[in-house]
Amino acid sequence: MNYLVVRSTVLLCGFSAAIAAHAQAWPNKPIKFVVPFTAGGANDLMARAAAEGASKVLGQPVVIDNKPGAGGSLGAELVAKSPPDGYTFLISAAGVISNHMIKKSMPFKESDLVPVAMIALSPSIIVAPPNATYSNLKEFVEASKKSPDGFNFATAGTGSTPHFVAEILKSKYGAKLQVVPYKSGNESATAIMAGQVQATSEASIVSLPKITGGKMKALANTWTTRISSYSQLSTATEQGFPEVKIAHWAGVHAPAGVAAEIMDKVAAAVDAAMKTPEIANRLKASGIEPIGGTRASFNQFVAEEKARLAAVVKVSGMKED
């Protein structure tokens, strides 16, 4: 046998053995979850719940590091360019998929981040001012069609979850809507409560206190199942709008190159966290639905989200401001 072939084979085997040994020894120091948004939001709260439970399974602290900015791209870039040693992960959201579709340029490739685990999701709720004459999604869509100028639908900017909700309602169901971009979900919520716009959508964890407090009127839940802590609100699918399927979800992505064994361990730890009664009940009480699952199931979810959101981007011509 050729000497170079033998030498290459030996080196390759040695490299593979080193990777396997590293995966077996992992983790031997704290793990970092980078949250690309500010503390206190839905993504951050889901990240902290996952970190709490996963740290107990993995036997090492899981530290939250908030790196907000650029619609989540700042934190995502940090993780994408981190060493693939299994100690830095991104708490991902829909932007990890949609930003590459709508932004003119990105500081990293889509393939630089790899899906690892689903944490949980906060269903989006379509809301209206408390004195709105329409009481459900069907009445809202019909009223928008009859309005001479249509209705104003507030969003948290291009590519935000409410922007996708509005575009789906327009393209799939003929709603007559003018998209009004605000700088944040808080601003669009304020506009709703002041009656300055006719509707928006917001994560259940944010909107439920305002709904139960009489400051907003809930029209529909945009996920496939009812919200555990507010089951009286029907889904858009139940109201005849099955294409309106979107939520504020949080998952875990890794830099490309992290060993499969390590990613499997992270996925199993997050899944265990979401099945811990104390954590699951706490999340459900705030309007968040714990999910968990395997690495394979999260990869499937991401692939389906990518295909669905890409279709909306294409039809609407959604592009970065």
Image: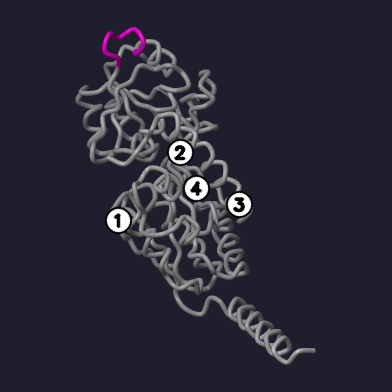
> Is disc 4 placed on a helix, strand or loop?
strand
Residue at (42%, 44%) from the top-left corner? 101
Residue at (52%, 59%) from the top-left corner? 114
Mark 3 or 4 closer to N-term?
Answer: 4
- The residue pinned by badge 3 equals 293
Residue type pointed to by label 3: Gly
Bounds of the magenta span? Answer: 144-150
Q: In this rendering, would 34 be left or right of 197?
A: right
Q: CA distance from mark 3 to mark 4?
A: 10 Å
Please tell me how crowded label 1 is: few (under 14), some (14-19), or many (20+) other residues with Cα within 10 Å: some
Is 24 magenta? The answer is no
- The residue pinned by badge 4 equals 120
Out of 160 and 319, give the one closest to the viewer. Answer: 319
Q: CA distance from mark 4 to mark 2?
A: 10 Å
Please tell me how crowded label 2 is: few (under 14), some (14-19), or many (20+) other residues with Cα within 10 Å: many
Is 145 magenta? The answer is yes
Mark 4 or 1 closer to N-term?
Answer: 1
Residue type pointed to by label 2: Ala
> Is disc 3 placed on a helix, strand or loop?
loop
- The residue pinned by badge 1 equals 68
- The residue pinned by badge 2 equals 247
Mark 2 or 1 closer to N-term?
Answer: 1
Mark 4 or 2 closer to N-term?
Answer: 4
Residue type pointed to by label 4: Ala
Of badges 1 and 3, the one in the foreground is 1
Q: CA distance from mark 2 to mark 1?
A: 20 Å
Mark 3 or 2 closer to N-term?
Answer: 2
Q: Residue 139: x percent and y percent? A: 40, 12
